[in-house]
Amino acid sequence: MPKISYLVSTYDSGHYLDSHIADLLENQTDPDFEIVVVNPNSPGTDGIIAEKWANMDDRVKYIYHHEREPYGASWLRAWRAARGEFVMNSNTDDLHAPETTATVFKHMKMATSPMHVGSKIAFCYGGITITDEHGRAQGRGLKPPFDFELMTRECWGGPQVAWRNDKSFIDDLDWDLMDERAASHQSAYDYWLWLYFMSKGYHGHVINQFITVYMQRPDSIENRNKHAN
């Protein structure tokens, strides 16, 4: 069982996907992870790139889906195929700090231990480094400690969040509801998911380390929706 399963939904993102997978495979200090890539019938080179890596490294699992679907639906498809003790969404245009696998596993293992007061913790998130499309640093930020009220007002989890994949947690979720919401959300499905975990009585956990490199680009789903509003 890998420590972390990185869930990658890709659609017409081949120019990011290749470097995203390469960065994970080549730069993580702990190699005990897998990458689950879902391609919902992309017209681009996504499938070719994912197949290439899957043939080169058995830590990469490639799943093709014959119809276009929102990224949340692809996430759930990847999650169902994941073997990791924990799972983490992994956006194609973002990167992870080299210590992400080791850091997330250590924190989540401790936080979800039955002996820990926070055993109802379902997900964790950490600090981010922001870059532009050319990799130039634009800023850094650590997250505040988890707070129910704060999270209900804004998605403090950030772009890449890790969560539990154990049977007791999975069995406590309404997968029909998650599938329904994933099919209707073109964006912000991740935020809905964290709120859903919280509605089930689970908590979040902050890691005071920089674990994500977030690329800020004008054509992202997030920015397209901002301009449309």
Image (cartoon, grey):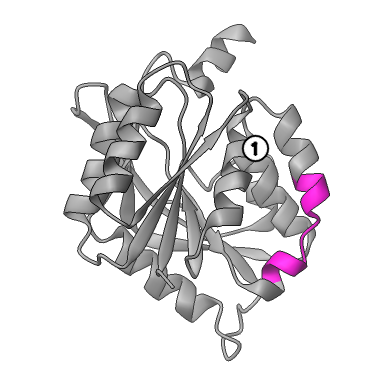
Q: Magenta part mainly helix, strand or loop? A: helix
Splitting the image into 4 quarters, where does residue 208 fall? bottom left
Quadrant for the N terminus, please: bottom left
* Foreground of the two, 35 or 203: 35
Q: Where is residue 36 in the image (x, y as percent from the top left)?
A: 44, 49
Query: Depth check: 5 or 145 in front?
Result: 5
Looking at the picture, which amino acid does disc 1 mark? Answer: Ala
- Residue that protrudes farthest toward the bottom in the picture: 115
Where residue 139 sits in the image (x, y, percent)? Answer: 28, 35
User: For mark 1, does the 10 Å Cα neighbourhood hold few (<14), some (14 to 19), or many (20 or more) residues?
Assistant: many
Task: Measuring from the top left, give residue 118's x and y in whole percent.
Answer: 60, 78
Inspect this view and state whether residue 22 appears: yes
Quadrant of image for the C terminus = top right
Q: In this view, does 116 lie above or below 183?
A: below
Compared with residue 87, is residue 217 higher up or lower down, i.e. above or below?
A: above
Q: Is residue 224 above or below residue 114?
A: above
What range of the chain is rendered magenta? 169-178
Q: Residue at x 35, y 62 (%)?
A: 33
In the rendered image, is residue 142 in sight?
no
Q: Mark 1 points at which residue?
A: 73
Q: Where is residue 111 in the image (x, y as percent from the top left)?
A: 52, 76
Q: Which of 186 and 77 is in front in this view?
A: 77
The local secondary structure at tag 1 comes to helix
In the rendered image, the residue lying farthest to the top is 228
**Residue found at x 77% / y 60%:** 173
Residue at the (62%, 33%) spot, across then down: 188
